Structure formats: C-alpha cells, structure tokens
Amino acid sequence: FCGAIFHVHEKSVESHWQLAHSLRQLLLLLASVTGPILDQKDEQMAYATYLLDGALALLSLVTTTVAQEESILLDSLSIFSRLVANFKVATLVKLPNFSHLLSAVGKTGTALLQANVQECESVQGDIESMEHREWREDALSIILEGCILLSEDPWLFYSGNEELRKVAQSALANTLCPMYHSFLACR
C-alpha cells in the first residue's frame, strides 16, 4: 500500500502538484501510525522499510529552492522524523537503506546550512532580507528533532546486540559530524 502511494506520488509530482502534496500528507500520517496495528516484527520491518525507502526517494527529488521542492523537502524530513520517533534505532538500524537515509538527511542539513550562509553573505548580514531563511530553518529544525531522537535513544548505549549498536553509532557519527561542522561554520 505504501509503495503504491509513493509510486503514484512519483508519477504526479511534476504535473499534479496538489495531488502530490496530498499524497505526501497521507504518507506523513501513515508514518505517524503507532500502537498495536502491526503485531508481528516482520510486518513492522516491512512497513518501516517502505516508508524509509520512500522518504529517501522523496529527498532525492529535491535539487533547488523552488516552492514545490520546499514542500517536498519539509514533508520528506517530517516523514524521517516520524519514522525515528515511532520505530526507534533498534528497528531502523536493521533496514537496508537506513544509513543511506541518514546520509541524505546529513547532506541535506549541511546544504541548508551552507545555503543560509551564502544567502546571509549576499545580503550583507541583513537576516530580515533573506528570502529562504524561514523554510530552511523549519527544515533544519525537523532534522535536529530527528537527530536528537536518534542520539538520545537508550538502545544505542544499554541494550540490544552490541554489533548492531556499533553500526548505528558509527552511522550516526558519520552523519552528524559533517553537519555539526557546518553548523559551527555557520555561527
């Protein structure tokens, strides 16, 4: 079901912007589903995989700063944040594309930070004149929220398979360090 929604979104994103936005909102709601709906661990993994792979595909659509892509970016980052909140690191680290999604989110965060610096420099430090600052800050807030949820997950330190914990810790470090360096450069 989720895969079909992502497929329809992909086909409609160019020609039917409103439909594509509505489909992303539906996917965001589906990423927010919690509780005993999926009782079996393999069902949870399959559901999380479809959503994670779809969020990764959505992030790959964003290349410029046009309004439609701003919406795609904010929606895909929101799906990422909801996945992290609902499935936690213990589940996500087992998914094949989790490290790819982390990498895409990290690169997106770094690009947003660098774009803010460039725009700030182009307006000679007049933050009020920055045209894209607000939506970039919204996107960065969503990324930060997801990264905090990932980093604070007790599973990373206290439970589960030690090998998987090290994989997750390494993936987080490789994602967050470059973004943190960009953040420091922006300050």
Image: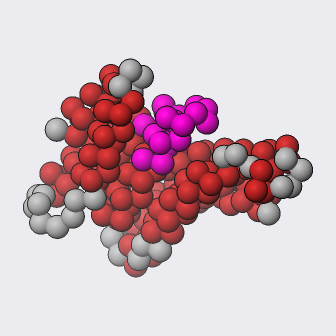
Camera-nearest residue between 132 and 48: 132
Q: In the rendering, at what x and y percent does residue 55 appear? A: 39, 43
Which residues make up the magenta segment? 58-75
Q: Residue at x 56, y 57 (%)?
A: 138
State the quadrant of the N terminus.
top left
How many numbered marks, from 0 up?
Answer: 0
Say whether residue 43 is left or right of residue 184.
left
Q: In the rendering, at what x and y percent does residue 136 appear? A: 61, 51
Give the farthest residue toward the right. Answer: 124
Q: Is residue 94 visible?
A: no
Q: Residue at x 58, y 33 (%)?
A: 66
Q: Residue at x 36, y 65 (%)?
A: 85
Instruction: Give the dominant element type of the magenta stretch: helix, strand or loop.
Output: helix
Q: In the rendering, at what x and y percent does residue 82 appear? A: 36, 59
Q: Is residue 102 visible?
A: yes
Camera-nearest residue between 62 and 106: 62
Say whether residue 180 is left or right of residue 89.
right
Visual colour scheme: secondary structure
Say whether residue 136 is left or right of residue 2.
right
State the quadrant of the C terminus.
bottom right
Residue 71 belongs to magenta span:
yes
Q: Image height check: is 160 above or below 46?
A: below
Q: In the rendering, at what x and y percent does residue 157 appear? A: 45, 76
Camera-nearest residue between 87 and 65: 65
Residue 83 belongs to magenta span:
no
Q: Residue at x 46, y 57 (%)?
A: 167
Say whether residue 95 is left or right of residue 35.
right
